[in-house]
């Protein structure tokens, strides 16, 4: 919570973007699996130039989320998702790695169906 000196900025969704969400089951044996069951990744996309303007991840550790943000933000959906998956395979060693990749693949499949 804020200590009074800090202000929490409220995020304003752009009126010209779309949101695409993908999810995947978390692996057995993880605490998050017992509490939540799945992980979700949301992308806010500009439909005109297909650039990713924001990213949201549930249940992803802080540094893993930073990695996904770094790879995805500003990239086009097709390239960004492919690059993010490759970066995760090379740089993110976690019991949730496969679930995160599956959630990104789910986002991509939904994007292809739009």
Image (spheres, rainbow, N blue to C red):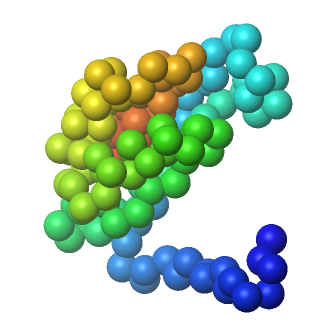
Q: Is residue 69 visible?
A: yes
* Residue found at x 33% / y 21%: 89
Q: Position of residue 95 (x, y in %)?
A: 56, 17
Tell me where residue 83 appears, x and y as whole percent: 22, 37
Image quadrant assignment for residue 14: bottom left
**How many tags in the picture?**
0
Q: Residue at x 71, y 18 (%)?
A: 30
Q: Along the horizontal axis of the image, is 63 left or right of 7?
A: left
- Evaluate whether residue 102 shows in this view: no
**Is residue 14 or residue 8 the one in the foreground?**
8
In what quadrant of the picture does the N terminus appear?
bottom right
Left/right of residue 24 with respect to residue 106 in the rendered view = right
Q: Above or below — where is 77 with respect to 18?
A: above
| Residue shown at the point (20%, 70%) measured from the top left | 48
Asked if 1 appears above or below 42 in the picture, the reply is below
Q: Residue at x 39, y 44 (%)?
A: 68
Q: Position of residue 44 (x, y in %)?
A: 41, 62
Viewer-nearest residue: 22 or 94: 94
Q: Residue furthest top?
A: 29
Q: Quarter-wise, where is residue 40 in the image? A: top right
């Amino acid at each position: 919570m804020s200590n009074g000196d800090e202000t929490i900025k409220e995020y304003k969704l752009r009126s010209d973007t779309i949101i695409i969400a993908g999810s995947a089951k978390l692996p057995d044996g993880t605490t998050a699996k017992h509490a939540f069951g799945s992980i979700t990744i949301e992308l806010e996309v500009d439909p005109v130039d297909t650039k990713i303007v924001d990213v949201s991840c549930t249940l992803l550790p802080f540094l893993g989320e930073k990695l996904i943000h770094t790879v995805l933000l500003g990239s086009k959906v097709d390239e960004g998702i492919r690059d993010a998956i490759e970066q995760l395979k090379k740089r993110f060693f976690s019991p949730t790695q496969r679930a995160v990749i599956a959630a990104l693949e789910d986002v991509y499949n939904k994007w292809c169906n739009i």
